[in-house]
Image: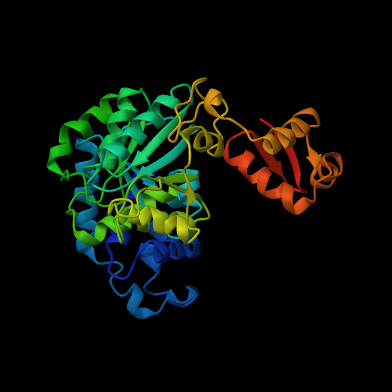
Amino acid sequence: MISEEYLYAIALRESSQIGDINFHKLVRTFGSAENAWKKAKREYKKLEGIGPKTVADIGNESHLKFAEKELSFCEKNSIQIKLRHLGEIPSLLNECIDAPAILYQKGSIDESHQKISIVGTRNITPYGKQFIGDFFEATQSCQYVSVSGLALGVDKEVHEQSILNKKPTIAVLAHGFEFLYPAKNRKLSEKILQEGGVLLTEFNSARKPDRENFIQRNRIVAGLSPATIVVETGFGGGSVSTAAFANDYNRDVFALPGKITDVHSQGCNQLILHNKATAISTIKDLVSMLGFNNPKEKIAELFPYSETTIQLTEIQETIYQFIKQSPQISLDDLAQETDLPSHKILPIILELELLGKVKSFSGRQFIAN
């Protein structure tokens, strides 16, 4: 029975030395958590890279008793239990080598919707708050689910803006469902569920919000989404670890640049400097890079410019007009048409790109916007 498999899965995961990767090896070798629980201690030689010390605690009756209590707690509190080896966790998260063996979930969402992870400092500034508000306003017509960590600051703002803009949101917790940290966000967590969102954790009900749990939690925030946006973070902030996980999982990472003197932007600036994140220059570009097909017609710009205030120089105007009249014109053809050498045209092309007038493609071809 599936309920029996849940029981043995929880007991197996409670065994010392059995983390998510070893759990996966066990169920892959023995076919189920129940079989692993009953056979691993005797037949550990079937397991590659696992010795007798690793399996020594498997079969401990106290873990089965704990699992029985956990199943009862989940049933009483409408908590769903998702097992990775039964294909029950989100597909993108399942691709991660260190994906959680077990997820505990309150609420439900449409898993087919794209997820976007948005994280940042607990000490959010007006700059970060405005960015989040502008992003949600610009993507009102897009279908997606936001993912964050239910912390104060950026996380809280993401969940609140999601609710305000009628977007489902996933809050990934760093503790079990017997607790809610921070307590200030209890009402917000209830609102998330009321508005069709989800509370998610890999930790059983007894696990408290210990310091080491937060970085462990961050890998789930990164793993759930094809893209992670870092809004504001300092050097060594928790969001830097989320970005690191996203990079390890080969996911897109975007960071909001800020003043070099602003401690809440220094982590973002470092991610961009070391090519660990793409710099966000405008909301419009971000929305495009995220692959949203139907963004709101009027998208607010993070660094706005007005078409009417752009005064092109004579040479910029000349190059622009040639590109406009001959879409996907090559650099060589452009040099021939304008009677200018390529090395003089390229800086002008870059200026036009930065002004949003021109786009370049592989093979040194250009089109006008």
The quadrant of the image that shows the N terminus is: top left
Question: 346 left or right of 136?
Answer: right
Q: Within the image, what quadrant is residue 311 found in?
A: top right
Give the residue displayed 24% in from the left and 62% down from the top. 212
Q: Nearer the viewer, residue 331 or 247?
A: 331
Q: Nearer the viewer, residue 134 or 55?
A: 134
Q: Nearer the viewer, residue 258 or 95?
A: 258
Q: Position of residue 258 (x, y in %)?
A: 37, 48
Residue that sits furthest to the left in the current view: 183
Q: Within the image, what quadrant is residue 243 found in?
A: bottom left
Q: Is residue 47 visible?
A: yes
Q: Position of residue 269 (x, y in %)?
A: 40, 55
Give the residue displayed 70% in from the left and 49% down from the top. 346
Q: Is residue 106 visible?
A: no
Give the residue displayed 39% in from the left and 44% down from the top. 2
Question: 256 left or right of 356?
Answer: left
Q: Position of residue 10 (x, y in %)?
A: 30, 54
Q: Is residue 161 above or below residue 224?
A: above
Q: Position of residue 309 (x, y in %)?
A: 52, 26
